């Protein structure tokens, strides 16, 4: 007798069930942060990445037709061209505590990947590097930042039992943000400002200038093209989409952009208020009261999430990060921020060493798994 069946879905009704499944699976898990259902629907049906990516959605159901797992299979041709690979990726992977569910879901995604000519599959990932990625492998007793995944520990047991191996790990830390930066960092920042005629810009003004927004994302593309593992440069459509979704929530109060004498972007340190607890209260929906909890959290700065830190290639390895670290330290103190969570950083990136300069503690480790097909 077949215990579970897998069904490909495409209707909005089924996609809504696909989106809602984790809310039921994690309803007794205090660390889980529900994603907004509206955002998930846009990601799965009409985001800019779908103009060039392929994706398939499947749910696993028991004999009673109840959903017990889900998975999304994706192929990003720009990634494969950029890295000379034939890789599919999986994401939106969730299942009950039964290996047979994970097995039937992963095997379905793998079979589809083979049919598309792929030779490898990795995940959990998003279409590009701006989405949620990485399976949690350490830190299960902690709440993730809003743009990171949470999963039960048995997920790792299931994927490794099915032949997946580690591709890479990302590390996250929690730090005290109002203790100031070392005197050495302040001195370096002052010397660099004077030597290269650098100054701090205003993020609130940048958000109102389409040309500057474009410069910001161009700098983002260039800064991370060689520094971020598995990075895929944004298309023009993705830049437009991300600027509309991302920029309104950024505030100069807890972020810093460094400009040269021509007002071209040199480096950036972008942070946002910590909204994970607000998203828990929203329970996946803006209405009727989710918007209130999120809006309230967006104007509370006692804890911040460090989202993006980087420098354009021509300024990398010159120490310019000292400028935005120094500026951010002053801003966090003025805003009353006491805690800061680092963004996930690949464990092999020497940039993670910067957190050793602050009073910090390990927060989470997440992993990307890989399997040959």
Image (cartoon, rainbow, N blue to C red):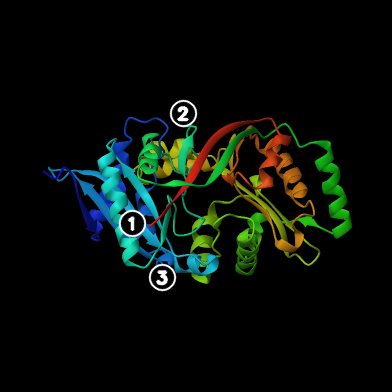
Residue 202, by quadrant, is bottom right
Q: If the image is split into quadrants, where does the N terminus sit?
A: top left
Q: Which structural element holds mark 3?
A: helix
Decide if residue 319 is on the left or right side of residue 46.
right
Q: Which structural element holds mark 1?
A: helix
Decide if residue 373 is on the left or right side of residue 331.
left
Of circles 3 and 1, which is in front? 1
Location of residue 123 in the rendering, given as x and y in whole percent from the top left corner: 43, 51
Location of residue 334 in the rendering, given as x and y in whole percent from the top left corner: 70, 37
Sequence order check, earlier mark of 3 and 1? 3
**Residue that label 1 marks:** 110
Residue at point 65%, 64% (across, down): 222
**Residue that label 2 marks:** 141
User: Which mark is drawn over residue 93?
Assistant: none
Residue at point 75%, 35% (across, down): 180
Sequence order check, earlier mark of 2 and 3? 3
Work out whether residue 305 can be spotted: yes
**Residue that label 3 marks:** 51
Tag 1 and tag 2, C-beta contact below 8 Å: no
Location of residue 99 in the rendering, given as x and y in whole percent from the top left corner: 29, 39
* Residue in the foreground of this view, choosing between 137 and 184: 137
Mark 1 vs mark 2, CA separation in Å? 31 Å
Badge 1 density bin: few <14, some 14–19, many ≥20, Cα 10 Å:
many
Badge 3 density bin: few <14, some 14–19, many ≥20, Cα 10 Å:
few
Residue at point 66%, 38% (across, down): 335
Residue 111 higher or lower than 154, as above or below: below
Work out whether residue 301 can be spotted: no
* Residue in the foreground of this view, choosing between 6 and 362: 6
């Amino acid at each position: 007798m077949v215990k579970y069946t897998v069904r490909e879905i495409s209707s909005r009704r089924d996609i809504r069930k696909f989106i809602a499944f984790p809310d039921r699976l994690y309803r007794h898990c205090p660390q889980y942060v529900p994603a907004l259902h509206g955002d998930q629907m846009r990601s799965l049906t009409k985001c800019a990445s779908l103009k060039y990516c392929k994706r398939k959605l499947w749910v696993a159901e028991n004999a009673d037709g109840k959903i017990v797992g889900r998975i999304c299979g994706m192929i990003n041709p720009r990634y494969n061209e950029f890295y000379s690979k034939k890789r599919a990726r999986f994401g939106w992977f969730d299942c009950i505590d039964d290996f047979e569910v994970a097995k039937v879901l992963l095997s379905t995604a793998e079979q589809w990947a083979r049919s598309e000519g792929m030779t490898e599959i990795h995940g959990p990932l998003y279409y590009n590097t701006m989405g949620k990625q990485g399976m949690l492998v350490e830190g299960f007793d902690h709440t993730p930042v809003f743009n990171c995944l949470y999963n039960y520990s048995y997920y790792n047991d299931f994927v490794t039992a099915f032949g997946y191996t580690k591709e890479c790990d990302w590390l996250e830390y929690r730090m005290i943000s109002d203790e100031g930066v070392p005197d050495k960092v302040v001195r370096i920042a002052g010397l660099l400002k004077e030597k290269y005629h650098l100054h701090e810009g205003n993020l609130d003004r940048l958000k109102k200038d389409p040309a500057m927004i474009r410069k910001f994302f161009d700098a983002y593309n260039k800064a991370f093209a060689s520094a971020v593992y598995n990075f895929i440069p944004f298309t023009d459509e993705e830049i437009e989409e991300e600027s509309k979704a991302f920029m309104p929530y950024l505030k100069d109060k807890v972020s810093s952009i460094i400009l040269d004498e021509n007002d071209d972007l040199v480096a950036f340190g972008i942070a946002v208020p910590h909204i994970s607890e607000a998203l828990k209260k929203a329970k996946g929906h803006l209405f009727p009261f989710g918007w209130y909890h999120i809006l309230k959290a967006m104007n509370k700065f006692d804890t911040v999430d460090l989202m993006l830190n980087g420098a354009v290639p021509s300024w990398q390895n010159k120490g310019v990060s000292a400028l935005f670290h120094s500026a951010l330290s002053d801003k966090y103190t003025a805003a009353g921020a006491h805690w800061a969570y680092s963004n996930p950083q690949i464990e092999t990136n020497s940039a993670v060493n910067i957190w050793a300069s602050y009073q910090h503690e390990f927060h989470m480790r997440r992993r990307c798994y890989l399997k040959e097909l």
